[in-house]
Image (cartoon, grey):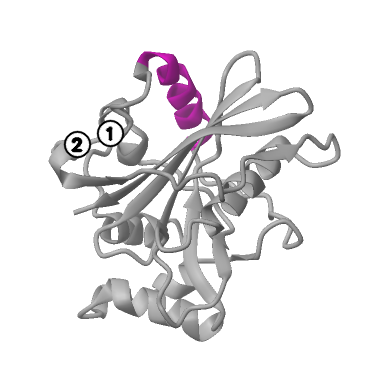
Amino acid sequence: MADDRKWFSAVLLTLAPCVGCSAPPRTESEVSRVEPPPTSSIRSIAIDPSIPRDQLLMELVLADFVQRQGRTPADADAGTLILVDHQNNGPPFGMVSDDQLSSELRDRDWPALAHLAADLRSRNGGVQSMPAPRSSVVPCVIADFSTFSKGLELSADPLSEYWRRMRAAYPDAACWVEFWLPGYAPEGDRALVRFSFGPSAHGATATYLVMMAGDSWVIEWCELAYYV
């Protein structure tokens, strides 16, 4: 399964820099950045001590993401369900390297984010099970994505076939996402949340900065990047 995930992640995201790879990080010209929409998106979620912190942040950003109609990769005939991989995006770290992130987040205060990115990488050193977001908060389902990727090396169009298999299993699917576990500040009051999503021709990612404000986690900003 691990080999399947590593192979398909390379195909799916057309990964640029990774540990031991010679390919350079994507340049700014290779990333089409999409600014977040105005006030219609979800901005906060109440802190609930009974819900794991990672799960709360996943729910917050997914609830925001699903509101970005016309800016997500949903097919015209797709439904509203978000498929969430049951495992995190582990190594290689090309898509969460400092070079990659500082390029995508060049309009943000990167020096203030670097330690969050370092914690994100340290938490994703191996493949781990992800918490399941509550369907009452966001229309989603946890799925084992490796079941869709088996044998795709024999497909003439692996990206389209991957999505076709997902839609066959989940006809109401609008898109899929694969999370990295969030990276936190030492004080625990800020976090960088990042996931890859599709369908997309060459791969796409969403990156959120969230902060604690009173008894809630609040979205400070979001950057969507579509790779070209």
- At which x and y percent is residue 207? 44, 39
Q: Is residue 80 visible?
A: yes
- At which x and y percent is residue 46? 77, 37
Answer few, some or many: residues within 10 Å of disc 1's Cα (few below 14, many 20 plus, some between 14 and 19). Answer: many
**Residue 149 as seen in the image, left or right of residue 212:** left
Q: Is label 2 in a helix, a strand or a loop?
A: loop
In the rendered structure, does residue 117 fall within the stretch colored magenta?
yes
- Distance, label 1 to label 2, CA atoms, is 6 Å
Region of the chain picked out in magenta, as a range: 111-125
- Going from the N terminus, do you reach mark 1 or mark 2 first? 2
Q: Is label 1 in a helix, a strand or a loop?
A: helix
Q: In this view, does 17 lie above or below 122?
A: below
Q: Which residue is drawn at 53% across and 74% down?
A: 173
| Image-quadrant location for residue 203 | bottom left
Quarter containing the C terminus = bottom left
- At which x and y percent is residue 102? 30, 27
Answer few, some or many: residues within 10 Å of disc 2's Cα (few below 14, many 20 plus, some between 14 and 19). Answer: some
Q: Name the residue type under label 2.
A: Pro
Q: Name the residue type under label 1.
A: Gln
